[in-house]
Image (spheres, grey):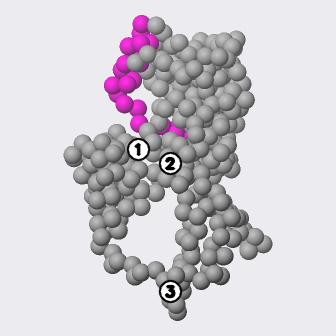
Amino acid sequence: MAEEAPSRLGRGLAALIGEDTAFALGDKEAPAPKGVREVPIEFLRANPFQPRHTFRPEDLEDLANSIREKGVLQPIVVRPVKGEENRFEIVAGERRWRASQAAQLHQVPVIVKELSDAESLEIAIIENVQRADLNSVEEAAGYERLMQQFDYTQDQLSKLIGKSRSHVANTLRLLSLPESVRKMIEQGKLSAGQARPLIGHERAEDLAREIVAKGLSAREAEALTRKTDPAAAGTKPKALPKAEKDADTLALEKNISDQLGLNVSISFSGDKGGEVKIAYKTLEQLDEICRRLAGRAAQKMT
């Protein structure tokens, strides 16, 4: 596997790490770095913040073959290990380091950066996500860690890594799947597209095994999920005919709809109460609803 790099990293990454390191992470538009040096391969050690847990042997072997032929084309980004002379911790490029060992290289090119633990974690996650080196579950866990530890919003993440906000939101939703289903994604048995229709389904684990066993496509997996949904299968009792709404209810619906910019429906069931339904078409609209509800809750607490 050759060291192929994307033409442009997330726009915020170069600002975070500097243009020299951006080049090392694959940004072809960044200027060539000046601080590259060769160090013995044994001076390097793995990054404890590495978000990637799966290194496929066949991929490493392909990269090792490329390195034997052409060498390491992009330097590995490292930081000094405090209290240990001539010891460096890998910030980005662990796959190149592992493949270089397999290729029996004695020295590798590195760029040494003075970075905090927080900066090391940010770069490790962002670099892997942007390169698509992570499976979807590892990617989601990386997003979640950045949001929890560094207070990133979904919008900030999307700009930083150069992906759409809907991609970030859809990926994060995979973390709500049962652990066994997430394992299938990590092992490459199930793709994110096949798994996404299973989110929130009570039979997610059984359906995941069926999708894998039958080799269903993402579209076929979605059809299977709809087919086995109790609501879609007609197992729920039919709703009673809706009574005509009075003028006050219609006015209230219009008022809330105007405020949200979305269709709102209010229904009453006498002494049993009622329900308010807000219809949305995109994940961005759902995010906005959640943001407003969370803001209201915060105001109540203060």
Q: Which residues are magenta?
A: 47-69
Seen from this angle, which residue lies furthest bottom? 271
Does the CB distance between marks 1 and 2 fall below 8 Å? yes
Does the CB distance between marks 1 and 3 fall below 8 Å? no
Task: Determine whether 242 is above or below 174 in the image.
Answer: below
- Label 2 Cα neighbours within 10 Å, binned few <14 / some 14-19 / many ≥20: some
Residue in the foreground of this view, choosing between 115 and 220: 220
Under circle 2, the secondary element is helix
Q: Is residue 300 left or right of residue 187?
A: right
Q: Is residue 62 left or right of residue 163?
A: left
Seen from this angle, which residue lies furthest top? 69
Instruction: State the CA–CA distance, disc 1 to disc 3.
Output: 40 Å
Reading the image, the residue beneath label 2 is 170
Task: Determine whether 151 is above or below 37 in the image.
Answer: below
Of badges 2 and 3, the one in the foreground is: 3
Q: Is residue 102 left or right of residue 280?
A: left
What's under tag 3, amino acid-wise? Ser
Reading the image, the residue beneath label 1 is 192
Q: Position of residue 109 (x, y in %)?
A: 57, 14
Q: Is residue 201 magenta?
A: no
Seen from this angle, which residue lies furthest left? 214
Q: Which mark is residue 269?
A: 3
The structure residue drawn at horizontal position 37% and vertical position 61%, both measured from the top left corner, is 201
